[in-house]
Image (spheres, helix red, strand yellow):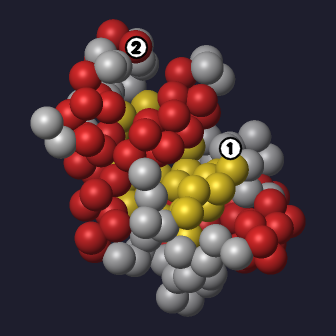
Amino acid sequence: MNLYKSVIEKHTVNDLNHNYKVLVVEDDDIAFFLLHEILASYPIKLYRAYNGQEAIDLFKKDKSAFDLILMDIRLPKVNGYDATQKIKEINPSIPIVAITAYAHSQGIIDCFDAGCDDFIAKPFEISKIVKIVEHYLVLRN
């Protein structure tokens, strides 16, 4: 049995009784695909921005369009630190989770200093993604 199935089998779709919208700000296709597969059994609609500027523009159009952001840090055009700061200026209550391969202590501090609410290191663990999503979506509502 693979790890993905063992984690997801512990949770049923009934654990989430809302259709959530999650913005994934990620320029890497493989990372986005993995997140999509991990969250596919939940009532979550994933949206994607390929860079920080696209994410900022989405929030300028509708500051409450999403329930959660999963934010890569190293992005083209506008990096994840700057995008997080701008998005938090538009909507301070939106939870933003940094997802990055730069998991050294200064990188983590920089994520929190930019306004991120949480941090996940790449390569990410499936159970950690599920736990974070549950925390910011299920327990928040």
- Can residue 22 be seen here? The reply is no
Q: What residue is shown with label 2?
A: 15
Would you name the residue on which mark 1 appears? Answer: 94
Q: Residue furthest bottom?
A: 77
Query: Foreground residue, 94 or 71?
Result: 71
Q: Is residue 102 left or right of residue 116?
A: left
Mark 2: which amino acid?
Asp
Q: Residue furthest front?
A: 1
Tell me the residue at 51%/88% (across/down). Answer: 76
Q: Dot 2 lies on which element?
A: helix
Q: Residue at x 18, y 42 (%)?
A: 2
Foreground of the two, 3 or 32: 3
The x and y percentages for residue 56 are: 61, 67
Extreme-right residue of the structure: 113
In the image, residue 62 sits, relative to residue 115, either above or below, namely above
> Is residue 112 toward the left or the right of residue 81 in the image?
right
Kindly report which numbered mark, 1 or 2, lies closer to the viewer in this rendering.
2
